[in-house]
Every structure is written in structure tokens, then in C-alpha cells.
Amino acid sequence: MRVGIIGFVLSLTAFMAQNASGHHSFTALFDPSRTVEIAGIVTEFQFRAPHCYIRLDAAGSDGVRIEWELETTSPGQLIRIGLTPENLKPGDRISAIGNPTRDGRPLMRLLTITMPGGEEIEIQ
């Protein structure tokens, strides 16, 4: 019986550790001391937990197309601030300000989005 309980506890601990490692640290991935601003066309809005993502086709400084990924907060928080798949769709032109990654990938933690109609929404 004791071996069974120890096995169960070890299994539960391993499962919980796996789930905890799946959620990244904000400051390990993103640089909160810097912001970047991009503009482009929405290609996809992934509205799902734990974080929503907006994919954006934008032109780089050399004019070459770059696909950016904008990480946002949870769907529930986005709904409360008025950002939903009903008002942000593929094909929409937006601009975004956010914290870039530390390693230079075209990924940012979205802080502010300017919607197609000009409305500015703060994500924080």
C-alpha cells in the first residue's frame, strides 16, 4: 500500500511539474525594457486559452515581409477590454506596440493595439 501511495505522489508531482514548465516566464522570453511598433495585416487571430495570439504580416525595415506573432492575454481578459474575433478579423490592418523577445524572433508581448477604425486598446 505504501509503495502505491508513493508512486501516486511521484506521478502527480511529475504531472504538475510538466504543466508548470509549459507556461513561460514573461521576463525570460520578452524584454520589458524595450518596445517595438509594427503595422500590418492580420492573417489569424487564435482566440484560445491560456494566451491568445494574433499573426500579422508586416514589412521589415528592408521591405521584406515578416510574419509577426503577437502574444496577448487570456480570452476572458480580451473580452472585458473589447477585443474579440468579431471586431478583429483576418484582412484587418492594425498597428501594435509591444515588448520584443530577447532573442530577436518576430514575436512580441502585445501592450497596445490600434484597431482598423483607429481605436486604441491597451492590453495590459
Image (spheres, rainbow, N blue to C red):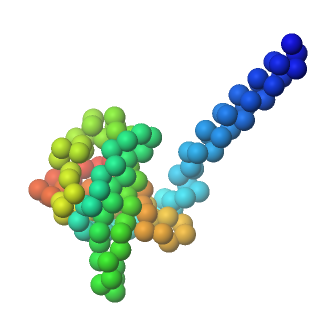
Q: Camera-side residue: 109 or 34?
A: 109
The residue that appears at 42% across and 39% down in the rendered structure is 49
Which quadrant of the figure contains the N terminus? Answer: top right
Q: Which quarter of the figure has residue 92?
A: bottom left
Nearer to us in this view, 120 or 8: 8
Q: Is residue 64 left or right of residue 17?
A: left
Does residue 123 appear in this view?
yes
Total labels: the figure holds: 0
Left or right: 95, with 22 as reference point: left
Instruction: Spot the residue most to the right.
Output: 2
Examine the rendered structure and indicate whether residue 62 appears above or below residue 101. Answer: below
Q: Quadrant of residue 40?
A: bottom left
Q: Position of residue 11 (x, y in %)?
A: 74, 30
Q: Position of residue 32 (x, y in %)?
A: 49, 59
**Residue most extreme to the bottom:** 62
Residue 98 shows in the view: no
- Residue at image location 61% in from the left, 38% down from the top: 19
Q: Residue furthest top?
A: 1
Residue at x-position 72% and y-position 35%: 14
Q: Position of residue 21 (x, y in %)?
A: 63, 45
- Tell me the residue at 24%/43% (across/down): 84
Residue 5 percent across, percent down from the top left: 81, 18
Q: In the rendered image of this protein, does residue 13 appear above or below residue 120?
A: above
